[in-house]
Amino acid sequence: MPLGWRSGIPGQAGAGCACRRSARGARDGITRTLKILALPPSRLSAKQLPDFVADLTPAAEYERAKQASLEQRLARQRSEGRPTKKERRDLAALFDREEP
């Protein structure tokens, strides 16, 4: 997610970023809120990212995305018919129950 996003308006990555400011951006159905702690002198690895950015996204946003993902997996097309044996096993594993 580019850190140049403000108020839902996309910008170039890194353009107009300042320390101690918040940035919001949507990706994969989640609107994330990040606080820029410091600007790195150069590119950095994902392992070093928490030193420069704090995630302020509410837990409810992650839960909403998880619920939407679950609903999408459970949805079947109207004419698909009965689930296959593999699909039934996957559904049983998803709901933590034994296959009959």
Image: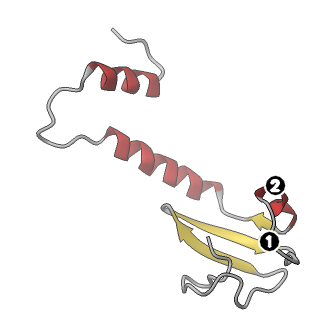
What residue is at 63 percent from the left and 75 percent from the top?
A: 2
Relative to the observer, which residue lies in front, 58 or 73?
73
Residue 18 vertical placement versus 26 (above, below): below
What residue is at 48 percent from the left and 21 percent from the top?
A: 96
Residue of label 2: 47
Residue of label 1: 43
Dot 1 and dot 2 residues touching (CB under 8 Å): no
The quarter of the image holding the N terminus is: bottom right
What numbered label is drawn on residue 90?
none
Say which of marks 1 and 2 sits in front. Answer: 1
Q: Position of residue 65 (x, y in %)?
A: 50, 54
**Quadrant housing residue 17:** bottom right
State the CA–CA distance, disc 1 to disc 2. Answer: 12 Å
Pointer 1 local density, CA inside 10 Å: few below 14, some 14–19, many at least 20: few
Q: Position of residue 72 (x, y in %)?
A: 35, 46
Pick out the residue farthest to the left.
79
The quarter of the image holding the C terminus is: top left
Pointer 2 local density, CA inside 10 Å: few below 14, some 14–19, many at least 20: few
Q: Position of residue 99 (x, y in %)?
A: 37, 12
Count of numbered circles in the view: 2
Q: Position of residue 88 (x, y in %)?
A: 32, 22
What residue is at 71 percent from the left and 70 percent from the top?
A: 34
Residue 80 vertical placement versus 88 (above, below): below
Q: Is 99 situated left or right of 8 in this image?
A: left
Q: Secondary structure at mark 2?
A: helix
Which kind of residue does numbered mark 2 sit on?
Lys
Relative to the observer, which residue lies in front, 98 or 60?
98
Q: Is 96 situated left or right of 41 in this image?
A: left
Q: Is 51 situated left or right of 89 in this image?
A: right
Q: Secondary structure at mark 1?
A: loop
Which kind of residue does numbered mark 1 sit on?
Arg
What residue is at 33 percent from the left and 38 percent from the top?
A: 74
